Image (tube, rainbow, N blue to C red):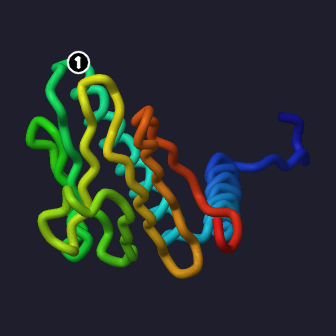
Amino acid sequence: MPAGVAGMSLLEMLLVLALVAAIALMAAMAMNGGLEGLKLRSAGKSVAAELRYARTRAIATGVPQQFELNLRQHRWQGPDGRQGDLPAALKLSYTGAGQLQSRADTGVVRFFEDGASSGGRIDLSAGSAVWRVDVAWITGEVRSGPLRGPGQ
């Protein structure tokens, strides 16, 4: 470099990059509901994936499979001994076939060998944000996503 021409050091460049990354992360969290929004979305997608897995196992094995959700303990259990926990900060609700429920605080969705199901709806909420997982009873299709307005 010619004398008298100043440049930026590697340390200064890294500092600027770290600052830009931190600002981008804060902006993304603000637009997505913060950490609670991220937990809600992650939990909703996880529940939907496990329901899809139960349906796939029922079709593949030719044996009905079921997914159970314990609303009080925030735990789920699926086929093949699969189980997991949901964040305690989330509020859970289940609407579905009452005759499959062994207890009032448990939601059950059963999938049959042809892909159909008993159907059901699971709502996960954090504050005013709600993530809904719907299971169609005729087709067994699992749909998942955020609610966009009141009454949906």
- At a point 49% along the width and 71% down the height, the residue shown is 36
- At a point 40% along the width and 60% down the height, the residue shown is 122
* Viewer-side residue, 2 vs 22: 22
Q: Is residue 96 above or below residue 110?
A: below
Image quadrant in which you'd find residue 26: bottom right
Judge whether residue 19 can be spotted in this image.
no
* Viewer-side residue, 40 vs 24: 40
- At a point 35% along the width and 51% down the height, the residue shown is 47
Judge whether residue 117 can be spotted in this image.
yes
Q: Quadrant of the C terminus?
A: bottom right
Disc 1 secondary structure class: helix
Q: Position of residue 70 (x, y in %)?
A: 21, 66
Mark 1, other Cα within 10 Å: few <14 / some 14–19 / many ≥20: few
Q: Is residue 60 above or below residue 80?
A: above
Q: How many marks?
A: 1
Which residue ends up furthest to the left in the rendered image? 81
Image quadrant in which you'd find residue 104: bottom left
Q: Position of residue 123 (x, y in %)?
A: 45, 65
Q: Position of residue 45 (x, y in %)?
A: 44, 49
* Viewer-side residue, 51 vs 45: 51
Which residue ends up furthest to the front in the rendered image? 99
Query: Along the horizontal axis of the image, is 93 left or right of 38?
Result: left
Q: Quadrant of the N terminus?
A: top right
Q: Position of residue 136 (x, y in %)?
A: 45, 43
Q: Which residue is mark 1?
A: 60
- At a point 21% along the width and 66% down the height, the residue shown is 106
Label 1 sits on what residue type? Ala
Q: Is residue 150 above or below residue 16?
A: below
